[in-house]
Every structure is written in C-alpha cells, then in structure tokens.
Amino acid sequence: MCSLSLASTIVAQQVAPEKRPNIVMIVADDMNWDTPGCLGGAGPDITPNIDRLASEGIRFEHAYVNIAVCTPSRSVMLTGLYSHNNGAEGFQRINPGTPTLPAILSEEGYLCGTIGKPLRQQDVFHWSVNYRWQGTGDENRWGRDPEVYRRFAKSFFQMAKVAQQPFFLMASSHDPHRPYGGGKSNAPHFERTKSSRTYKPSEVKVPGFLPDIPDVRKEMAGYCTSARRLDDMVGVILSELAKTKNTDDTVVVFLSDHGMSVPFAKTNCYVESTRTPLIIRWPKQTQKNQVDREHMISTVDLLPTLLEAVDLPLPEKLDGRSFFSLLNGEKQSGRDAIFAQFHHIHGRNPYPMRSIITKDYAYIFNAWSNGKRTYRAEPMAGLTYRAMKRAGEKTPSLAKRVHHLEYRTVEEFYNLRKDPFCLENLLANKQQGATSKSSKQALEMLRQKLRTWMVKYNDFALDAFDHRDSLEALEQFMQDYTQRSGKEVEAMKPYEEAKRYGF
C-alpha cells in the first residue's frame, strides 16, 4: 500500500517544463508600416533599434493586421481567429473558452508575462505575471517610459531563469499613439519620458495618402518623436534579452497593431490601415537581413506560426495558417491576398467594413455608407483632419477627399499598381464602374474571393454583401447590427465592474 501511495504521488507531481524556444513579441500602437527606417522611414534615423533587428532577421513587406483598432487587432494575434469569431469585434472581451497563445503556452510550462497596453482578461489569457499600472486607468499617462519596460523585462527574464522555464513576453507600447512627444509631468503616477530625439516639421516625410500642408507636418513631427521613443523601448527590451544569453533561443517578433491615427489609416480597411511592419528574428532559424516581398500574410497567422515554431499542437478551432516555412526562405502557395474587417469601437455608431487586398488591387465593402450617414472616429481628433478640412475650403480636390472620408460609397476599388495610396476610387459612382476590361475582371475576382472568405469564416455580414445594391437591405442590416453590438457592449459592464477593468 505504501508503494501504491508513493506511485500515485509521483504521478500527481507536475512535469518539469520541456526546453523550448522563448518568444518575445513587441507590439507598437498606431505605427504605420513604413515608419521604421528599414521600410522607408518617416524621419531621419527614426528607428535604429528596429532597423538593427530587421538586419538580424527577416522582414515581411506584405504583412497585414486583420482589423485596424487596438484591442480587436491584438485579440486576433493571440487567438488565430478573426474578430467576429473570437468575440472581440470592438473593445470587448474574447469569448470565454477560446484558446489563446499565452494560455496554451502557460499550460505547456511557459512563463508568460505582459507589459504595456493591457489585454488583462486573465480568465482567457492566463498570464503568469502582468504589469499593473498604479494610476486610475488613463493610458495617456503610462506605457511611454522605456525604463519601466527595462525594469519589468529584467525582472521577468530573471524569474524565468530561476524557475528554469521557457518564456513568452508580450511588450505593448502606447507609442506612437496620440498624444505625441512630451515628457515628464507633475500629474501623479505619470510614466512618460522624453524621447531620445525630437523631430521638427521640416524633417519628416508626409505619407503619400495625406496632403503635405503645415499642420500635417506638425502632427507628423510629434508622431515621429513618439515613434523614436517606441524604438527606445525596443532597444531596452532587446538589451535586457541579450544579457540573459538567450538570444539564439528566442523568437523575437516586432509589429504594429495597425496604421497611424490619421484619416484613411486607423479604424478603416485601406492598405495604410492594415499593413504592418512585421519583423521576425530567430538566429537558429532565420538568416540575417532577409526580406520577403512575395508572400501576403496577416496577423491571424501569428498564433499557428509561433506554436509550430515551438513544436506545440494547434487548437482545433483556427482561422489562421502557419507561415513558419517562410522563415526558412521557402515558398507557400495561396498567399496572394489578405482579408480585413472593421466593426465598431464601443458598440455605438458601428461602421461595418470588409476588404480584400492583393499586391495589385484593393476592394472595400462599406455596409454603413448610404450617402447621409457620416463617419466619425478617433483619427479625426488630431491636427491632420482639421487641417484637411480647412484646406478643402480653398482646394476642391482636397474637399472631395474629405467628403469621401466622411461619407464613402458602398463599394470602393483601387488599382494599387497606379494608385498605391488609394486616392482614386474607381467606383466613385455606379455609372462610372471600373475603367478597363482588366480592372473589371479584377473587381469581379475580388468580389468573388471576398464572398468565398465570408462563407468560409461564417461572416455575419454575408447577407448584407449579397444585397449591397439594395439600400433597404443595407439599412435593415445596419439597424439590426447597431442594436446587437450595443447590447453586447452593455452586457459587458458587469464583467468590467467585477474585474475592475474597463475596455
């Protein structure tokens, strides 16, 4: 009996963690894909640490997020499910019971930590340790001091060493999210420090989808200053990782959650909304200074890719597809398009959109557009939108651009070979149509591929898409969806109160 008792006790003991590669994921907030110097550069010497990371690994020039707003975008990254399938269509929790990357890794013996922009939801993420800000929740006051990230990373890496566990660290900066630049403040619990470089309006590069006017340059200068502070944060994380002597055994992933907070980028479905500066360094797997210009990948693919990298099985329910073989320089078929969506922020005034983007064309379906309903979102709170609005009073072409931002059309179609910044909607009116036979063929091909995607992934907007020529059908869809999304957000309030956490 003693022997049996001892045997059952041994079986009950926790198995020691298996040695596996570590993962560090660094996520920028509101950074455009071409801001880093290695992808074009929004200003001189703007991202020396990110550029160095790219030179030591592989960068993907056609990588995209699947939804251009922070909480839903990060939820896609950590579930491998599109937002309508993981529950976080806007600022909402992930559906209970959904497998997440940190929960899966934690179950397999990983120490999982997160610092910065919060995705707390401990019931689905199962973080081993997370950084808890001491203030009252105003994120404009925190997540902008590289030294805070250094202290947490150093402590976290030491904890993993003592525990002899592989680790997963997700470091999410609040930079370069507005408010830009800035340093210390007398406000309590303030964690914002001065950037290592302050940019002047004359130094910056205005993106091609925005007008080059003084206030746009002014806002871009602040944006670049914050982007440089993000790079400072990347530098301290990589420095602390190097001190652990684990660099060769660690997969480092850098990307942004979506495009910058200006018109036609964040909270939309354009190329500049969803394209992300994805860089992966893994000395044991990737050769230095590699560039993938061929394959189109999206962040719904991150979870399966990272699980394959650490040799763990994939969850049964998964929308993404691993691109692990691309890290070895191999090729994959079926990577010629990405799909993006947008729903709402807090359930109110939703703007449901869907898009399919290839290297040559972009097609966008705006279920909300009826010629009367106006688009309003956070990117219109900055200097850029107001400057465009004022300049449009004297410049008809800019007035037309602003009008399109505010009202759209049900369908948009762009030839990216001729118009990479989506400036000319080839479906501006029903009579115009696509201008050439090849464009018409491309348009129909994209419509069909988008519909196939909507069917495959059970997109609730499928019926609206099928009736996109019916104003009555679209209005009924908008009424139903506005009612549903509002109820879902209201239903979250008891959870937020119980968890002392507001989305």
Image (tube, rainbow, N blue to C red):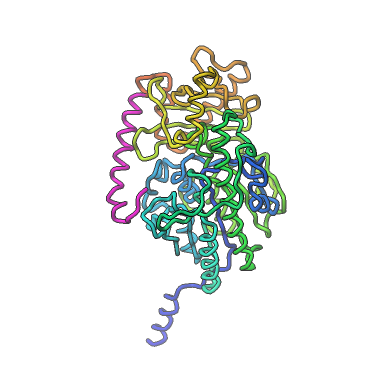
Residue at 48 percent of width and 58 percent of height: 115
Q: Quadrant of the N terminus?
A: bottom left
**Residue displayed at 56% across by 23% down:** 443
The verdict on residue 498 being magenta is yes
Q: Residue furthest front?
A: 186
- Front residue of 273/249: it is 273
Question: Is residue 346 shown left or right of residue 41?
Answer: left
x and y percent of residue 135 in the render? 38, 57
Place of residue 474 in the rendered image (x, y in percent of width and height, measured from the top left): 37, 24
Q: Residue at x 36, y 55 (%)?
A: 136
> What is the magenta segment's predominant secondary structure?
helix
Q: Nearer the viewer, residue 165 or 390?
A: 390
Please report the bounds of the magenta region as a residue range: 475-503
Q: Residue at x 52, y 66 (%)?
A: 156
Residue 446: in magenta span: no
Give the image location of residue 250, x and y in percent. Answer: 61, 61
Q: How many marks?
A: 0
